[in-house]
Image (cartoon, grey):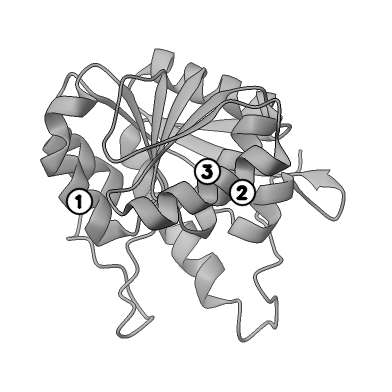
Amino acid sequence: MRINIVGTGNMGRSIAVRALTGGHAVRLVNPKAGSGQLLADGLKQRFPDGEVAYASSVGQAELTVFALPYDAALEVSKSARTDLSGQILVDISNPVDFTTMDALSTPPGTSAAEQIQENVGADVQVVKAFNTTFATLLETGEGHGVPLDVFIAGDSQTAKDSVADFVRSAAMRPLDVGALRRARELEAMGFLHIAIQQPLALNWQSAIKLLS
């Protein structure tokens, strides 16, 4: 796959590492050339046989990942709507109210992923994924020697299958949890996972794992 990764922070870097590990071509998207090019150069050194490029805007790809905070993801989903037409869009955000760290910022009865779907329109297939994983473990794809679980929600089965294929290629386990409205529960899980880091002294080294 050719994968756009919009955002070059910790999560963007970790998803890029997983993508390159799985043999995919990565386009890092950031309007600020400095940070985007710096990450691209570092990844080229780490994966000399991998295909890594930097761009200031979204191009055509099999997957586009918004590795962005909630507010930025909402903004870009509006401004890049035309560029995203016909694509599968992965939203990883957790809409936490960081002023209180005690609630989600989304209105009742919806989720960040559903808001993004509304912004981009019906010809973009939005999938929620990666919001319950932290960047440090995601970069390795595992925790304590066990592959990470990646929970996936979306209304298009074809889009979810494409995301699941990517997750498997990156040596992790995809779990399809249902329609895009299940992003509400995934974002609540993500919020809880963030909220317990300090009181349980987890130091961002924990993962949510489904055992069966």
Q: Quick one: label 2, few (<14), some, or many (20+) residues within 10 Å?
A: few
| Residue assigned mark 3 | 40
Name the residue type under label 2: Gly
Rendered view: 157 above or below 176: above
Residue at 19% across, 21% down:
85
Label located before the other in sequence (3 or 1): 3
- Along the viewing direction, whichever of 174 and 65 lies nearer the viewer: 65
Residue at 74% across, 48% down:
140
Q: Residue furthest right?
A: 145
Q: Taking 108 as reference, is 142 left or right?
A: right
- Along the viewing direction, whichever of 206 and 27 lies nearer the viewer: 27
Q: Quadrant of residue 201?
A: bottom right
Name the residue type under label 3: Ala
Residue at 24% across, 16% down:
86
> Which percent across, then down, holds residue 168?
67, 25
> Which percent across, then down, holds residue 102?
37, 80
| Residue assigned mark 1 | 74
Q: Quadrant of residue 208?
A: bottom right
Question: Marks 2 and 3: in contact by CB < 8 Å?
Answer: yes
Q: Quadrant of residue 149?
A: top right
Position of the C terminus, as image quadrant, is top right
Name the residue type under label 1: Leu
CA separation in Å, label 1 and label 2? 28 Å
Q: Taking 162 as reference, is 7 left or right?
A: left
| Residue assigned mark 2 | 42
Question: In terms of secondary structure, where does tag 3 sit?
Answer: helix
Question: Marks 2 and 1: in contact by CB < 8 Å?
Answer: no
Q: Say which of marks 1 and 2 sits in front.
A: 2
Label located before the other in sequence (1 or 2): 2
Question: In terms of secondary structure, where does tag 1 sit?
Answer: helix
Say if residue 121 shows up in the picture. Answer: no
Question: In terms of secondary structure, where does tag 2 sit?
Answer: helix
